[in-house]
Image (tube, helix red, strand yellow):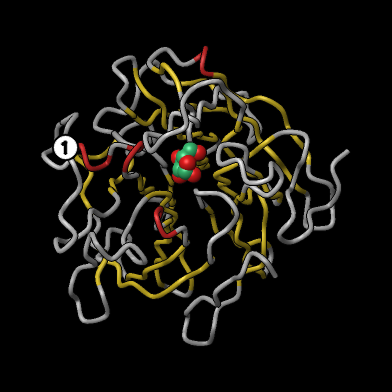
Amino acid sequence: MNKAPQPHKPLVTHIYTADPSAHVFEGKIYIYPSHDIDHDGPDNDNGDQYAMEDYRVLSLENFDSPVIDEGQVLHLNDIPWASKQLWAPDAAYKSGTYYLFFPARDHQGIFRIGVATAKSPVGPFVPQPNYIEGSFSIDPAVFVDEDNQAYIYFGGLWGGQLEKWQTGTFEQNAVGPDADAPALGPQVALLSEDMLSLQGESQEISIVHEDGSPILAGDEDRRYFEGPWVHKYKGWYYLSYSTGTTHKLVYAVSRNPMGPYTFKGTILTPVIGWTTHHSIVQFEDRWYLFYHDSSLSGGVNHKRSVKYAELHYNEDGTIQTIDPNK
Ligand code: FUB
């Protein structure tokens, strides 16, 4: 049996897990990670090494109880529109139904976002026959606001193909903006009442400096790369994300879930391994960061492990930077 989790240690060691989306459902913590596997394919900037084929769910009664592997909840073979690479998922709950949002390449090799439903937080999840119309790229994160309106955030550069959608259609050879041009932001859309489709087209979120000027594409310590997450704290929306090439988790804040968001600072300094990806969740009266690194595999980028740390806010609402080595 797995032990109770310890801060900055792998939650489980019998499988590799990454991209944790943590939620509190029915008073328990549920973690929806990617399930990393070994593979014989290439390892490159296109992300071919991330060849995941299924999703599993982890659960915790609380931080003193063992981590339970709830088993497989969805497999690639059961998703008609998907061909490969089940990357970072997220889950949501609304009106008696649990939703699993997930990216995968379609049969043309284009990343899209699908949704599957279940009556329990541990599935099994039944996928919709097609991907969400109007969705593209990777790393869906769903935030349900206090008024019950749900928002979906998504997008990732490089293997995640976000730069190929700048004209609104997929352009295989498109590259990102020049270093001195505004960076690409993540996409956001309202979800429909039944959570299965977008309400209108998605739009790009702008992330700006305190003076209102845009974060530039060459500002790799601050610009958006992948892995968006939105949570709300004391009336502010916090958009946090990975900076990719500089391997940080950073955040920006707004009074509006659609942005613009003002850049604030770093949540997590670089971990072992290239990718860094996270979620932030409140459990009882404390806040937690779930993230991953590649320490368990000795630094193999596509064999990662989910970890956690407590997250602390300052009086002014800023987040204290976490060092994963402490
Ligand atoms: O796990 C595959 C990809 O790596 C995710 O979609 C990204 O966020 C990065 O963690």
In the rendered view, tell whether residue 45 sits above or below residue 81. below
Residue at the outermost bottom position:
315
Residue at the outermost right position:
1
Instruction: Identify the residue shown where x is 53% and y is 61%.
Output: 270
In the rendered view, tell whether residue 197 sits above or below residue 188. above
* Front residue of 111 and 49: 49
Q: Quadrant of the N terminus?
A: top right
Residue tagged by mark 1?
Answer: 174
Instruction: Identify the residue shown where x is 63% and y is 46%.
Output: 299
* Front residue of 114 and 168: 168
Could you tell me if residue 197 is visible in this image? yes
Instruction: Identify the residue shown where x is 28% and y is 46%.
Output: 189
Residue at the outermost left position:
167
How dense is the environment of label 1, judged by Cα within 10 Å: few (below 14), some, or many (20 and up)? some
Where is residue 164 drawn, in percent x and y? 20, 37
Instruction: Identify the residue shown where x is 42% and y is 74%.
Output: 265
Q: Quadrant of residue 103?
A: top left
Could you tell me if residue 88 is visible in this image? no
On screen, residue 168 versus residue 26, left or right, reads left
Where is residue 156 drawn, in percent x and y? 34, 44
On screen, residue 30 versus residue 129, left or right, reads right
Q: Quadrant of the C terminus?
A: bottom right
In the rendered view, tell whether residue 173 sits above or below residue 258. above
On screen, residue 170 versus residue 116, left or right, reads left
On screen, residue 325 versus residue 186, left or right, reads right
How many numbered tags mark residues here? 1
Where is residue 162 drawn, in percent x and y? 27, 41
Q: Amino acid at mark 1?
A: Ala
- Residue at disc 1, CB closer than 8 Å to ligand 1: no
Where is residue 243 drawn, in percent x and y? 39, 58
**SS class, disc 1:** loop
